[in-house]
C-alpha cells in the first residue's frame, strides 16, 4: 500500500542556517581567546564566561545539525519527519547549561575564602572582544528568526553579551579597588543567568515532548473557531500539540445533527481553513459525528450507526 507522505513545514528564514554558521565560527574563535585570557589573568569570571561560550559553541553546533536533519523528508517509518531533533537539541543545551553552572558555583565557593589577584589588564580587552562578538552574533541570529533551536541560540548570545558587560564592570572596579572577591561574585551571577536560561530551554522542550498545548494558543479560542462553522453543534476530544516550535497539529471530533452528515466535507473544509487562517494550524485530523449516535460513530452513507473501533496510531503525535 502506498503512503502519501508530506512535510509539515514551519515558517523559517532562508538566512537561518547561514546565521548559525557565522555565529558558530565567531563563537569558536572567541572561546579560544577567553580561555587563554582567563587562564593568564587568573579570572574565574572570565573563565566562567568562556564556559558559557562553550555551551554556546555546542548549542550552535547542535542547532545547525538539527536544522539540517529536520529538513530531511518524511519516510514511511518516520511519517512526521525529523523535527523533534530540534527539540532534543534544545533540551540537551539546557542540560549542558545547568551542569556547567553547577561547576562554576562550586569553584566560586572555593575562591571566596582566599580570592586570588586578577590580571584586570588582560580581562578588560578580552571582555570587550567578547561583548562585540556576542552583539554581532545576536544581530545575525535575531534577523534570521526561526524555531526553538535558533531562539535558544539567540538566548545564549544575549546572555553572553550581558555577561561580558558584567565582567567589564567588575574588571573596572577591581582595577580601582583591588576587591578581588568581585571575581567569584560575578561568577555566581553568571551561573545564575545560565540556570535561568537552562530552565527556560528545558521547560519549553519538555512541553513539546510531553505534547502539551502550545503556549501561544488559547484552546478555548481554537474550540470557538471550530464551533463557529455552520453545522457544528459541539466539539470534543480536542487536542493540539507541537511537533516542534511553529509546527502545530490538531485533532478533534465534531458533533453535528444527523441531517448535516452529508455536509461533512464542507464542514471539515471550513474548519480547516479557519484553523489555518486564525492560528496557523495546517495539520488537522477532524472527525464528524452525529449527536444522535450515542456511544458509537456514525458512518456516512450507512443507515445504521456502527460501533467505534479502536484508533490505530501511525506516527508520532497521532490522536484518536
Image (tube, rainbow, N blue to C red):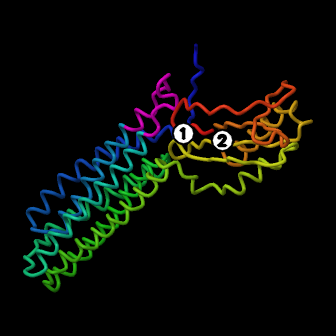
- Residue located at (52% from left, 48% from top): 211
Quarter that holds the C terminus:
top right
Q: Which mark is residue 206?
A: none
Q: Residue furthest right?
A: 259
Is residue 63 or residue 258 the one in the foreground? 258
- Residue located at (79% from left, 29% from top): 299
Provide the residue span drawn in magenta: 66-84
Is residue 121 or residue 2 the one in the foreground? 2
Residue 234 in the magenta stretch? The answer is no
Q: In the image, 97: left or right of 215?
A: left
Quarter that holds the N terminus:
top right
Q: Say which label, 2 or 1, has the lower sequence index.
A: 2
Residue 81 in the magenta stretch? The answer is yes
Look at the numbered disc 1 and give the secondary structure of its residue.
loop
Q: In the image, 129: left or right of 115?
A: right
Q: Which residue is mark 2?
A: 251
Q: In the image, 172: left or right of 162?
A: left
Query: How much space separates mark 2 and mark 1, taking CA atoms?
Result: 10 Å
Q: Residue furthest top?
A: 1
| 291 shown above or below 106 | above
Is residue 32 or residue 243 the one in the foreground? 243
Q: Main secondary structure of the magenta part?
A: loop
Q: Residue 219: x and y, percent?
A: 67, 55
Q: Residues within 10 Å of mark 1 (few under 14, many from 20)?
A: some
Q: Which mark is residue 317?
A: 1
Amino acid at each position: 500500500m502506498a503512503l502519501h507522505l508530506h512535510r509539515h513545514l514551519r515558517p523559517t528564514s532562508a538566512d537561518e542556517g547561514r546565521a548559525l554558521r557565522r555565529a558558530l565560527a565567531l563563537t569558536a574563535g572567541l572561546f579560544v581567546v577567553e580561555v587563554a585570557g582567563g587562564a593568564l589573568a587568573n579570572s574565574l569570571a572570565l573563565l566562567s564566561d568562556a564556559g558559557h561560550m562553550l555551551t554556546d559553541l555546542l548549542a550552535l553546533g547542535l542547532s545547525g545539525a538539527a536544522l539540517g536533519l529536520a529538513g530531511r523528508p518524511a519516510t514511511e517509518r518516520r511519517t512526521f519527519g525529523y523535527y523533534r531533533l530540534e527539540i532534543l537539541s534544545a533540551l540537551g543545551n539546557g542540560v549542558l547549561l545547568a551542569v556547567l553552572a553547577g561547576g562554576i558555583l562550586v569553584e566560586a565557593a572555593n575562591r571566596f575564602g582566599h580570592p586570588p589577584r586578577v590580571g584586570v589588564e588582560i580581562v578588560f580587552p578580552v571582555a570587550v572582544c567578547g561583548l562585540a562578538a556576542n552583539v554581532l552574533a545576536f544581530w545575525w541570529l535575531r534577523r534570521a528568526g526561526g524555531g526553538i533551536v535558533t531562539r535558544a541560540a539567540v538566548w545564549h548570545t544575549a546572555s553572553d553579551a550581558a555577561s561580558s558587560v558584567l565582567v567589564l564592570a567588575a574588571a573596572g572596579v577591581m582595577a580601582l579597588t583591588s576587591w578581588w572577591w568581585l571575581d567569584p561574585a560575578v561568577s555566581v551571577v553568571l551561573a545564575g543567568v545560565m540556570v535561568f536560561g537552562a530552565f527556560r530551554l528545558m521547560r519549553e522542550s519538555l512541553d513539546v515532548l510531553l505534547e502539551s498545548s502550545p503556549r501561544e494558543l488559547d484552546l478555548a479560542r481554537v474550540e470557538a473557531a471550530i464551533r463557529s462553522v455552520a453545522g457544528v453543534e459541539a466539539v470534543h476530544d480536542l487536542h493540539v500539540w507541537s511537533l516542534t516550535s511553529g509546527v502545530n497539529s490538531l485533532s478533534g471530533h465534531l458533533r453535528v445533527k444527523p441531517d448535516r452528515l452529508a455536509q461533512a466535507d464542507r464542514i471539515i473544509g471550513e474548519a480547516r481553513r479557519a484553523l489555518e487562517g486564525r492560528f496557523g494550524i495546517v495539520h488537522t485530523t477532524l472527525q464528524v459525528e452525529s449527536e444522535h449516535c450515542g456511544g458509537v460513530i456514525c458512518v456516512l452513507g450507512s443507515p445504521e450507526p456502527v460501533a467505534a473501533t479502536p484508533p490505530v496510531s501511525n506516527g508520532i503525535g497521532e490522536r484518536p
